[in-house]
Amino acid sequence: MPKSTNSPSKATQSGPFSRRRSKLARALKSKGADALLVSDPVNVAYLTGFRGDSSELLVTKSRSLLLSDGRFTDQVAEECPGLDAVIRGTGESMTKAITKTLKKLGCRAIGFERAYLTVARHEALKEALPSAEWVGLENMVEDLRQIKDREEIAQIREAIAFAERAFGILRASLRLSDTEKSLADDMEHYLRRSGATQCAFPSIIAAGRRAALPHAIPTDQPIGESEFVLIDWGAKGTFYHSDLTRVLVTRKISRKFAKIYETVQKAQSQAIDAIRPGVTAGDVDAVARGVIEKAGHGSAFSHSLGHGIGMAVHEGPGLRRGSETVLEPGMVVTVEPGIYLNDWGGIRLEDDVLVTKDGHEVLTSVPKHLEETVV
């Protein structure tokens, strides 16, 4: 049965989750909303620590309630101690549970996540509460997620450790007869053995010409048939992710490989050196892009320099051309310049970098000097 919501509860969830909800509640004041309906599962987890699904969160200026169902009663109690929960009954829809709760809370102006609430749910809620004003909001939680606290940074470090351990196992056992797909399968196994709950994303293993595809899907091509292989992988811990890319040489380093690799490495190094509080994300992108353009490969760098990483593999801030987002301490970003030549292949190097009060800290440590690429 749902926990009663007829009167305000004194119970609050302590720790980082409570602090995050308090920040969100304060931010609601400027949006003209009495409450925010949080529908994105990642945002729900960020605000509550809940790892289940099929659940949404209502945040008001004075309290928060997690709306879930009977499958998660014990899990909510275990993962979110002290957080008020509404456990909807069997056969009761989420729309009905939300409507009943909002009526009890007396909310009239209700914010919702425009990027996640479906049109069908939005229409159903408006029909159920015709007197309420529904306010579409964007990035209310995502903006909070850009700045990581100490606990979040520690969890990102842990996810990086899982990924680096798995890569070490993969490299030590690598054979030239291995295919792209078999290595991708092995990587998933090694990530879990190393402590990850799962891959952060499907690993990209691309040999030779196929490495010119930034998001290549692994095939049955043996890596030994090509001069080099690109490996893009990451780990997920309890909530947080890591994301790395390295290139390994399966033969003797060629002059062309060395020249392109060193250009990418220089672009990455100079971009990382530019990371510090007060600099815009667009300025950091421009540093790497300038190096690659000067080398004559500007059109071969076909994506942004990097992205924020945290509870999602891709989140804010984006290190992209023209971005005016100002970097702040606590942001964690990937720096991943690349050069992709369709008739030859592609090289990308990627590391995870923390913006600190005084500059930056590179969190990843997998070797990437040219001479260390040979397997």
Image (cartoon, grey):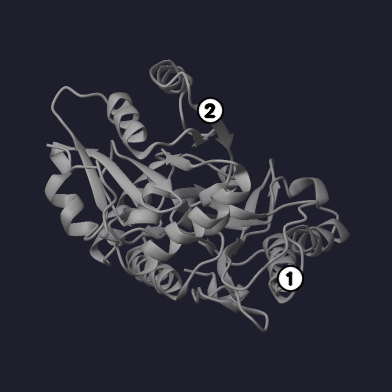
Residue type highlighted by circle 2: Glu
Front residue of 310 and 204: 310
Q: Total label count?
A: 2
For the question of whether residue 231 can be seen, the reply is no
Is residue 355 found left or right of 255 in the rendered image? left
Horizontal and vertical percent for residue 104?
31, 35
Camera-side mark, 2 or 1: 2
Q: Which secondary structure lies at badge 1?
A: helix
Q: Residue at x 68, y 72 (%)?
A: 272
Residue 97, horizontal then vertical, whole percent:
27, 30
Confirm or deny contact between disc 2 and disc 1 (CB under 8 A). Answer: no
Pointer 2 or 1: first along the chain: 2
Residue 265: percent from the left, percent from the top?
A: 68, 68
Q: Residue 236's x, y, as percent?
A: 36, 58
Q: Is residue 303 left or right of residue 314?
A: right
Local SS, label 2: strand
Residue 150 falls in which quadrant of the image?
bottom left
Q: Quadrant of residue 214?
A: top right
The residue at 24%/57% (across/down) is: 80
**Residue corresponding to mark 1:** 266
Residue closer to the observer: 80 or 134: 134
Residue 372 sits above or below residue 181 on the image: below
* Disc 1 crowd, CA 10 A, few/some/many (<14, 14-19, 20+): some
Q: Quadrant of residue 39?
A: top left
Q: Which residue is mark 2?
A: 133
Q: Residue at x 46, y 20 (%)?
A: 126
Type of amino acid at the residue the image marks with label 1: Lys
Tell me, yes or no, if residue 137 can be seen here.
Answer: yes
Q: Residue furthest bottom?
A: 358
